Amino acid sequence: MRILIHNARILTMNEHYDEYLRGWILVEDNIIAALGEGTPPSNGATIDETIDVIDANGDLVMPGMINTHGHLPMSLFRGLGEDVDDRLFRYILPIEREAITSEVVRIGARLGAVEMMLGGVTTTADMYYFEQEIGRVLDVAGMRGVVGQTLADFDAPDHKSFDQGFGLVDDLRDEFANNERITASIAPHAPYSTGPKIMERVAEYAANNSGVRVQMHLAEMKSELQWCAEHHNCRPVELVDRAGLLSPGVILAHCLEVTPREIEVLSERGVTIAHNGRSNAKAGRGIAPVEALRQSGINVGLATDGAMSGNTLDIFAQMAPASMFAKLLGGSRKCLPTRDVVKMATIEGAKVLGLGDKTGSLIVGKCADIIRVSLSSARMTPIYDIYAALVFSANARDVTDVMINGKWVVKNGETLALEQPKVLADALQTAEKFNKIVQRIDLSKH
Amino acid sequence: MRILIHNARILTMNEHYDEYLRGWILVEDNIIAALGEGTPPSNGATIDETIDVIDANGDLVMPGMINTHGHLPMSLFRGLGEDVDDRLFRYILPIEREAITSEVVRIGARLGAVEMMLGGVTTTADMYYFEQEIGRVLDVAGMRGVVGQTLADFDAPDHKSFDQGFGLVDDLRDEFANNERITASIAPHAPYSTGPKIMERVAEYAANNSGVRVQMHLAEMKSELQWCAEHHNCRPVELVDRAGLLSPGVILAHCLEVTPREIEVLSERGVTIAHNGRSNAKAGRGIAPVEALRQSGINVGLATDGAMSGNTLDIFAQMAPASMFAKLLGGSRKCLPTRDVVKMATIEGAKVLGLGDKTGSLIVGKCADIIRVSLSSARMTPIYDIYAALVFSANARDVTDVMINGKWVVKNGETLALEQPKVLADALQTAEKFNKIVQRIDLSKH
């Protein structure tokens, strides 16, 4: 299978940030075979009847975006209890306890996958319950994913004990052992919801299963600092480090509450970080020190978090906030410039997930994870700086076509493998069930 | 002329926040004649051949959005010198001095108007040079606007002296004296660029011309505080108050640098405020105390600022940041809830511009400024809370149709009175001229 896209503005996000104002890219099977400026050379890209030739009509072709942290099925909670301070304990945990089944997880993961692909996300990290179902949904959808089975000591809907939870991780590992696009992962929820012993056991598990990545929420909020101080007389980073959990390949979500010394420790340990700027801000928690983290050498990716926290699952909605928050924190327009933001959304995000050799930039030999973005709206006119246009003017609806691993998953704004009307109808039906639980909860409070 | 829109989800933004899950609205000439839940009654909205009946197919119908501060022609500077700290003095002022003519203003204003209408903005406030041209563009486009002739002591492209500047205000006032949609306004640029004497003269002018509103940048940045302290031994709010400029009908942009006591003063004087959250954050300047301002009784609207500062001219791109910034400032998810944000984007914004009796909510007798927003995307599914969906999930591209003063200006995502391809082509040509100036400036710096 060969696909040639030409007459495209190409943003490679390679190490030189090469751009082609009028370029072409050749995909063979699932791989980027060649790309360049101008007219495709006849030797590199022979145009014959075996090749699918696409005129991009001046649209932007760039690497697919990487979402480094999320909870796909929580799309079903989008906007529920918005602006309510105790919504987690009031609504979300009770609904999860009562209504989260593998079937509901499948429905929510489909909704999330459709939204992500339409918004140009080609790779996502995820941590939730019934994670095997989520891996299957991403596999069917055609997406790339790092799927993490959550372990937590509160009433998890899919495991009654940690032993049972580790069993689910085994199942996940075994099912996706040879999958080209889906990577199994183990996801201890957070320090306060697993505790030191389980974190030690997770570290051991990861050491014995080199393909299985660790994902974890860390240093997210003041209540977590309090818990660590009260129960272990230390701060979250130290507690997790003591458990031996900080090592290369570990993906930490949030990391708001980190001191300069802790940033050094995180950098020395070789972890990577998922920045959930929008989710953190919406909760009133603060701004993660993204520039300091990156300056220490840590790879930091952009992340949506679950839609119950950030409301959308596209990286376009994360880029402008990430840059604005860093500029507010640093007090200057120069902080976290737009090119760095696009880097975090693509190649740096891929590195965060350990997939930097496969995706995140348009380089010969890499997997063909490619999106096409319309630049022709008034909102994007004129373009002096393509990075500024992407970060501050573009939105998810500007994505028209999405290719993952050499296969189209979105064409002309329509998902292919997942049937959108059915996915949305199932989601609406599930939301009605959730709404009934919410009404019961609200009634019982009056 | 009668238009009936039915089968719509209607958000009225009236004082009771009435919503109709399946509603209808009847427009006669330029006025909202009736609206309600369910099937339109045959007495109120007789369906005959004289009426245009539109099935909204479950889409949202809501008031058009109000942009309370901007500089339309600066759309031509969008993304120029992005992330460069001294871009104002390095690029923007030199380009303005050399290249801003009435023709360029017209081209930029058209670009801005197209972008705003496509994004659901039906009313905009503006302050720039050659403002008469901008009023004419908005008039032709079919938009509602408060157009402010800027007065400034730096090299303004359209006046060499303040006397000449006041003459331009006279011209503006005279041209739009009887215009239904365009209101003339006088816009002293800022305290540091006009000085106390001119501010006094503006106050007098406004007192003698009751229809002419005052718009001004105030308390925007640290350098302004310094200038006021050095030259007048006071803070900006005091300086402007001493000049007699703070009175009902005065629209102040920014107001970041205000103390609790100054907020009281602003409230007592009856001014209104345009909140440019995105523009302020992008410049690393800080977060305006929106909740404190509103709690003091001041009407605060949302604003895009010019696209050289905020990059887009739609209010959807302002809503999420406004809420997030307030939550960060207040440290809680409860701060500036989404319903308040939608209020600021609509009826409160209309009040900021003195147009609360004409636009900003769907009420019988008001002008028909109405937008239709698609709710059917995965990104907007499910909807537990329409305000959360609008603030945190919707974007400018979800707007499909826009009516201003009873006339369609956008249908199916296409502008009617302004020809988009021509508008964009003119803008691109002008941007090329700007680019040449930029190249010359950059060369001279090396």
Image (tube, coloured by chain):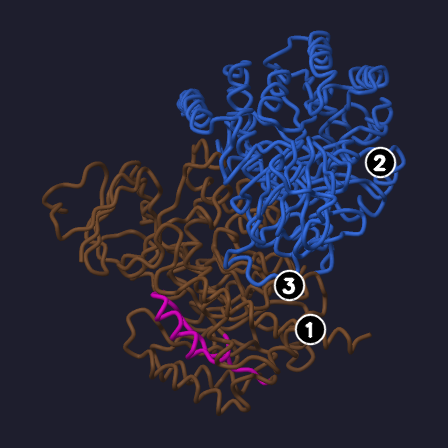
Chain colours: A blue, B brown
Quadrant hosting residue A259: top right
For disc 1, the marked residue is: B438
> Is there any visible trace of residue A346 in the rendered image?
yes
**Front-lying residue, B352 or B234:** B352
Write down the region rendered in magenta.
B128-153
Which residue extends farthest left? B43
Residue at the spot 78% in from the left edge and 15% down from the top edge: A198
Which residue extends farthest front? A48
Q: As shown in the figure, which amino acid type bears the numbered disc 3?
A: Tyr
Q: As shown in the figure, which amino acid type bears the numbered disc 2?
A: Leu
Quadrant hosting residue A435: top left
For disc 2, the marked residue is: A266
Q: How many marks?
A: 3
For disc 3, the marked residue is: A384
**Front-lying residue, A209 or A331:** A209
Residue at the spot 41% in from the left edge and 49% down from the top edge: B399
